[in-house]
Image (spheres, rainbow, N blue to C red):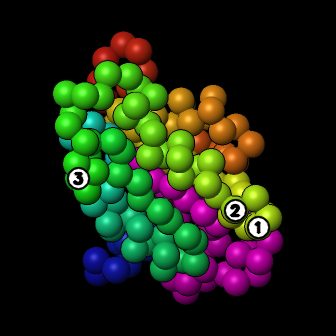
C-alpha cells in the first residue's frame, strides 16, 4: 500500500512522467532532455530531508542530488558567519558551476526548492541561467509570509 501511494504521488508531482505498471516508460526517458534534479532544502533542514524524494526519483529513472547549503548538516560553517544569501547559496552555485560542460545530459538541471530553498534557487537562476532548465518552488516564501 505504501509503495502504491508513493508511485501515485510521483506521478502527481511529475506530470510529465509516463508510468506504466508503476515503472517509468523507457521510451520517455530516452526522449527526456533533462533527467537531473537538484533538491534544495529549507531553513533549518539539510539534504537529509529529501531522502524519500531521492528514492522515488531514482525509482523512475531520474537522477536526483540533494544539496546541503552553507552551515547545514554536513557543512560545519558557523551559521553566525553567514551574512548574505550568496554565502548561504554557495554550495549550490559551486555545484552548478562545476557541472561538466561536455555532457549535455548533465548540463541542464531542474532545481527544486522548499521553503527558504525557493530564495536560494531564485538566486541560482540569476547566477547560472544556462545550467537550469526549470525551477520548482515547493511551499516557498512569496514576499507576504512564510509557507
Observer-nearest of 42 and 29: 42
Position of residue 70 measured from the top left corner of the image (x, y, whole percent): 33, 42
Observer-nearest of 126 and 22: 126
Q: In terms of secondary structure, where does tag 3 sit?
A: loop
Task: Tell me: residue 134, above or below residue 102.
Answer: above
Observer-nearest of 57 and 10: 57
Position of residue 29 measured from the top left corner of the image (x, y, whole percent): 71, 75
CB under 8 Å between discs 2 and 1: yes
Side of 78 relative to 31 (left or right): left
Task: Tell me: residue 42, above or below residue 25.
Answer: above
Q: In terms of secondary structure, where does tag 2 sit?
A: loop
Write down the residue under mark 3: 73
Q: In terms of secondary structure, where does tag 1 sit?
A: loop
Side of 97 relative to 85 (left or right): right
- Magenta-drawn stretch contains 13: yes
- Which of marks 2 and 3 precedes in the sequence? 3
Question: Residue 117's quadrant in the figure?
Answer: top left
* Alpha carbons under labels 1 and 3: distance apart: 30 Å
Q: Which residues are magenta?
A: 11-40
CB under 8 Å between discs 3 and 2: no
- Which of marks 3 and 1 precedes in the sequence? 3
- Magenta-drawn stretch contains 106: no
Task: Tell me: residue 106, above or below residue 2.
Answer: above
Write down the residue under mark 1: 103
The reply to whether residue 108 is visible in this rendering is yes
Side of 21 relative to 56 (left or right): right
Quadrant (top left/top right/bottom left/bottom right) for the C terminus: top left
For image coordinates 36% across by 44% down, the residue present is 69
Task: Tell me: residue 140, above or below residue 135.
Answer: above
For image coordinates 39% across by 64% down, the residue present is 53
Write down the residue under mark 2: 100
Position of residue 104 measured from the top left corner of the image (x, y, whole percent): 78, 63
Amino acid at each position: 500500500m505504501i509503495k502504491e501511494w508513493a508511485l501515485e504521488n510521483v506521478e502527481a508531482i511529475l506530470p510529465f512522467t509516463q508510468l506504466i505498471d508503476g515503472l517509468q516508460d523507457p521510451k520517455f526517458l530516452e526522449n527526456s532532455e533533462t533527467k537531473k534534479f537538484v533538491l534544495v532544502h529549507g531553513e533549518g533542514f539539510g539534504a537529509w530531508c529529501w531522502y524519500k524524494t531521492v528514492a522515488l526519483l531514482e525509482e523512475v529513472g531520474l537522477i536526483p542530488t540533494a544539496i546541503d547549503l552553507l552551515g547545514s548538516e554536513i557543512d560545519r560553517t558557523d551559521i553566525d558567519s553567514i551574512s548574505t544569501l550568496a554565502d548561504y547559496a554557495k554550495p549550490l552555485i559551486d555545484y552548478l558551476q562545476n557541472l561538466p560542460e561536455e555532457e549535455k545530459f548533465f548540463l541542464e538541471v531542474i532545481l527544486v526548492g522548499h521553503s527558504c530553498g525557493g530564495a536560494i534557487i531564485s538566486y541560482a537562476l540569476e547566477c547560472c541561467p544556462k545550467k537550469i532548465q526549470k525551477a520548482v518552488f515547493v511551499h516557498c516564501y512569496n514576499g507576504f509570509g512564510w509557507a
